[in-house]
Image (cartoon, rainbow, N blue to C red):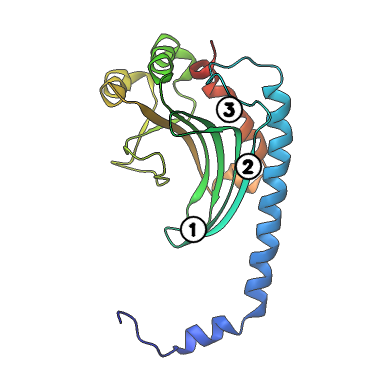
Amino acid sequence: MSETPFFSSDDLQLLADRNFFQKKISISRKIKHTLEALHIQLALEVGTRTFLAPEDFNLQASQFVKGEHLEHFPYQYLDFPRHFTRQAKFAFRSLFWWGHHVVFALIVEGPLVKQYRTNFFNRFPEITDRHLCLSLSPSLWEWKTGAGLTMDITHQRRSELAAVLDRRTSFKIGRYVPFNDPLAESGEIIQEGLRTFRAILPIISP
């Protein structure tokens, strides 16, 4: 057994701290309400748009998820728009990851990725310098950011981005907002999620 079975005084103090767990419940509710409000705003936006999406894409499909173990930290997210099959993925995920950040991310995989790459570079000026990052991980489910994990989408990095995206059959582009960012403290999270969605539209529009 790697950890001692005995509880330290700090462990016992935390176990007895009802206030801590009540705060966690309260914050989780606020996150849920935030995601629900974002869903309403995204639905209004989606209703005015046409997408380059899989043939059986359902414009109304969405999913709210809450869990405790994303690399040992709690999380809540909204997928909308949402399309997940073995052959193709097309989704916009809004993820609150405790201990890390809020992420708004486009997730794509499958036959249409080649066209998404073409759109990315043909419409490059519309996408760059919007605080977006390309995930460097081959996994779509890596949610950390930083050196070696993500690359800022800027005008100067066009050739580097092209090298990363070359021949990929999937990719993820995200906006990462730390919890100490002024956007979070000022209550701008919903608006930032909507701005991020609009920023990635050139990639997924016909």
Residue 99 screen position, x and y as percent:
49, 58
Judge left or right: residue 5 versus residue 199.
left
User: Is 158 in front, or is 28?
Assistant: 28
Circles 2 and 3: CB distance less than 8 Å?
Answer: no
In the rendered structure, which amino acid carries the disc numbered 1? Gly
Q: SS at mark 2?
A: strand
Task: Report the residue marked by disc 3.
Answer: 197
Task: Report the residue marked by disc 1.
Answer: 99
Query: Could you tell me how far apart the alpha carbons at marks 1 and 3 are, in whole angstroms?
Result: 24 Å
User: Is 65 in front, or is 198?
Assistant: 65
User: Residue at left 69%, top 37%?
Assistant: 39
Residue 72 screen position, x and y as percent:
44, 62
In the rendered structure, which amino acid carries the disc numbered 3? Phe
Image quadrant occupied by the N terminus: bottom left
Query: Could you tell me how far apart the alpha carbons at marks 1 and 2 are, in whole angstroms?
Result: 23 Å
Tag in front: 1 or 3: 3
Judge left or right: residue 158 versus residue 176.
left
